[in-house]
Amino acid sequence: MTDDSTGTPLSRRAFLGTAALGTAVVGGAAAGGIRLGSAGRADSADADEARPAPSRGFRGNHQIGVLEHPRPHGLLAAFTCVDTDRTALRETFRELSEEVDGLLSGRAPADTDRALPPSDNGVLEEVTDPGLMATVSVGASLFDRRYGLADRKPRELVTMPFLANDRLDPARSHGDVLIALQGKEPDVCVHALRQMMRRTRSGLVLKWMQDTFTRPDAIPRVGQTQSRNLLGFKDGTANPDAGDEALMNTLVWTQPADAAVTATNREPAWTVGGTYQVVRVIRMMVERWDRASLDEQEEIFGRRKVTGAPLSGKAETDIPEYANDPAGEVIPLTAHIRLANPRDGRTKDKVLVRRGMSYSRGVDSAGLLDQGLAFVSYQRRLSHFLEAQERLKGEPLEEYLRPEGGGFFFVLPGVVEIGDFLGRALFDAR
């Protein structure tokens, strides 16, 4: 956790490309109204937090889906690699990349004999604006002995351990590959997943998946967070400005300097342009939370539930006044926002880009709602997430949360050249 169309309809084949081109930290703070902080920038910059990075298609130095404003619906799908050798695995990633490229660019599906299965499942045939984004990352387990990639593993990438209050379900945790899909409607993600699985069925086996959603009217506005998590608090307050390229190079993307010979904790050269990704599937004890008083809920977060303002302010963008409240009489010392970002210099250049998405899995065997947050964060150093998690250990919010799945991953660098594919530099590194 951290502190924080009119006109004649187009077919899916014709529109997908233009749509793409135009278009634990508990998440809200990650779990709702939690602030990230200013990463050493002037506090007034908090008012710009809602400005998203411009959307685009498949090609670019970085993958789509990291900095862009989240779509209303999402799907996380983790896979196990079953290829027998590195050559076959390399081909799987080439096939996957080609499919992602086609889905994002609107490339028309190949015609097939009517006696054969069609090349596209047809789920989105009449959809005019899917808003699809797809992000591919790899887990620590891909770098075991199977493919001889151990010496190419990102320096800080490890299998996600049990952290504070965790009850991780192995069936919903980790994976060799993670594909994060986002779209304007659930069927956009379902369509894309099926197309990708069909293309890579000889090399990737689905391990676990999680459908997610955010508020359909979650439109980014400067100074105001539109989405709320299932605890009722605003989600994403004070996220750093994703449209600030220099800031994102500091906070998110692996830089050439990280792979330099003189770098401390030197990263493999292929990682430049990628980023560490944390996924935490966090169940919320919503029945218990709904019985807590409003005062208790706001003291736990350190923010007003309706406005998102810190307890020491009136507006969501107000900066918490810790210096004038050393004893925690206004904002408790144990409040989530205070622990996540104490604003004492410790979080300078260590702010995470958080992407909290809600989920609802129905009801469990005890008749309780299985709902919560799929918290996703992106950071240049995995250690930055772990430092924040350590500060939050034992916080009062833990009583209402139970992390049950997810994992640590590394988002592959983007693809620029035609003919290139995601992960090529990893497989071809010497």
Image (cartoon, rainbow, N blue to C red):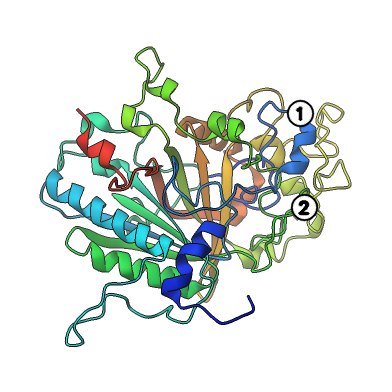
Viewer-nearest residue: 231 or 237: 237
Image quadrant in which the C terminus is located: top left
Can you see residue 339? yes
Looking at the image, residue 159 sits to the left or right of residue 297; the answer is left
Image check: 183 left or right of 93? right
Amino acid of disc 1: Ala
* Disc 2 and disc 1 in contact, CB within 8 angstroms: no
The quadrant the N terminus occupies is top right
- Residue at image point 72% right, 48% down: 300
Q: Residue at x 31, y 54 (%)?
A: 97
Check disc 2 and give the amino acid type.
Gln
Residue 240 is labelled as none
Q: Position of residue 78 (x, y in %)?
A: 34, 57
Residue 416: percent from left, percent from top: 38, 43
Residue 334 visible at all = no
Label drawn at residue 42: 1
- Image location (x, y in percent) of residue 282: 52, 55
